Amino acid sequence: MMPGGAGGIDNSSSSIQNNNSTYEGTAYQWGSGGMDAGGGAPTTTTANVPCTVPAVNPRPSSTRARTTQSWRRHRNLSLLSLREMDPDDPRHKAVPPSFVRAYPLDDDDDSNNRGVNNNNVGRGKRSSFGYPASLFQATSREDDHLYALRRFDNVRCVSHQILQTVYDAWANAVDPTAQRSVMDHPNIVKFHRCFISHRSAVFFIHDYYPGAVTLKEKLLDRQQQRQYGNHHPMPMTEPFIWSCVTQLVSALRVIHASNMACRCLRLNRVLCIPSTGNGLNVNETTMNCRAVKMRFRINCIGIVDALEFEARKRLPDLRAEDMRCLGRIILSLATGTDVTDVTATSGGGEEDEKTFHQCDAFLTQSYSHELRNLIASLLTSSPDRLHPPSIFDVCTVLANRVFDELDCTNETSDDLDSCLSVEYESSRALNLLLQLGFVNERPEFGVDGRWSETGDCYVLKLFRDYVFHQADEAGRPVMDLGHVITALNKLDAADDERIVLTSRDGSSLLVVSYADVARCLRTAYNELCEGSSNLIARRRQHRHH
């Protein structure tokens, strides 16, 4: 629905019972801000008399604003999901036949790969995984869902058996506490499958989130270039960092508890997904980020396990590396510089300690001792502690911060529930309009050429004129949106209030209640659905064949 059609119901006095639901009041209004209720139907009226509606209190403007913002965001995300390459684009050859409507996601990202070019179709630039890679959003022919399709070329050490082994390990990983799959965790991008397709390319399929960007791209690269010209670091506020850490630790806790290792904790492999009521608000001058409105998800699960299958390490060593990677991410956010690439490829633990000591003075001056000590424990060692703390030790440190995140999550849930309730009111009107549109003026139904002109359907035809085709004494059309909204609300509630329906030529005059009209609509629409069910079944059967 458009923003102007969203809103909530404001009501007055009486009570209407309908299908185990109670509607308080007989005067309704969609408090949308884009639709003014100028009138409604009185207790008894004819089709050519304008009506008025009692004054009601609209919904708070903040609710309407959130609803409009939510509608715009989801519309933009829908447009992103509908992007496709040109039919003659040679990069179509890089996508497996089981996927359609592909669109490259790495064209604008110079730090990764540019995708596929005309001279070397299917070969992307070298990625952070060490192989040429290309990233697409594509729709699966099997379930018609949109996925992130990542292709790797020149991978000679991976076989079908290795890919199956890696996928089975992740698919069967279960959180022992919640007894749910690790892939269902809210801070992990779900890993669906992996396979080898044409030209010996390896493909990994993950969930796709329209509008999501990596943590590196969102918070470091682009905003540095826009605000500071890449000359000054741009550290994040401490609440933002704690929120990010809390969410990443939550995902790591589940992964390590299921006897697995993440192996993909880097800034360019953590997705940031803002949304209405759960998005990132950035003050352009002070960089005051509200991390409580951002969802972080660990991406690329399973890729490193497959590409480096032959060089496997001990599980304790992999978990220790996960914790060091977590420390590098926190240090990167605190200093505004990406330290993950340098320390991951040069000196390991020694390079981590060197980098931390270089930043220690800045951390002590800018952040709390709690955050500074957490980074120190993850990146440095001591004679009595040669390895970083386990994920469960970090969970103990974050106990107080988890309550802050829980409070923000509940606040976000309340905001989304308010938006959902507003959209529900819009969907009720849309549902009624669609059913009336299917029934009214239908040329024929089966062998009955006058089906829509007799019985219950004739009542619906007169009701349509009563709602939308009113006129005043001079025959001029009455454009009364308040009357339309009130009538649709009472129809949905099956109100016992009676109205007078008149045919256009004045030869027919019916006195019916909204409950009678609702029954006629339900009966006629169900009759249409039953008559079309066989046709739908035949179409589905034909599609499968």
Image (cartoon, grey):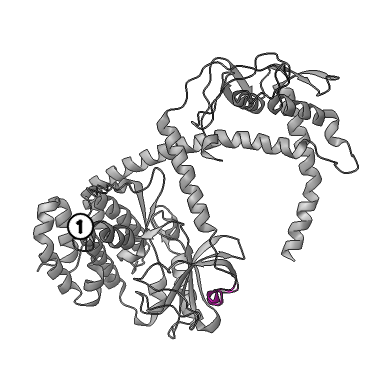
Could you say which is closer to the camera, residue 152 or residue 43?
43
Could you say which is closer to the camera, residue 308 or residue 528?
528
Residue neighbourhood size for the residue with mark 1, other residues' Cα within 10 Å, grouped as few (<14), some (14–19), many (≥20): many
Location of residue 448 in the rendering, given as x and y in whole percent from the top left corner: 90, 39
Q: Which quarter of the rendering shows the N terminus?
A: top right
Going by the image, does 316 lie left or right of 29? Answer: left
The residue where tag 1 is placed is 334
- Give, as a single range, the part of the protein colored magenta: 88-97
Seen in the picture, residue 197 relative to 106 is either above or below; the reply is below
Location of residue 329 in the rendering, given as x and y in whole percent from the top left corner: 25, 62
Could you say which is closer to the camera, residue 396 or residue 330?
330
Q: Assess whether residue 13 is covered by the magenta stretch.
A: no
Q: Quadrant of residue 127?
A: bottom left
Going by the image, does 3 lie left or right of 261? Answer: right
Location of residue 256 in the rendering, given as x and y in whole percent from the top left corner: 33, 63
Residue lying at 26% horizontally and 66% vertically, measured from the top left: 325
Going by the image, does 25 lie left or right of 281? Answer: right
Amino acid type assigned to the residue bearing label 1 in the image: Ala
Q: Residue furthest bottom?
A: 156
Q: Assess whether residue 90 is covered by the magenta stretch.
A: yes
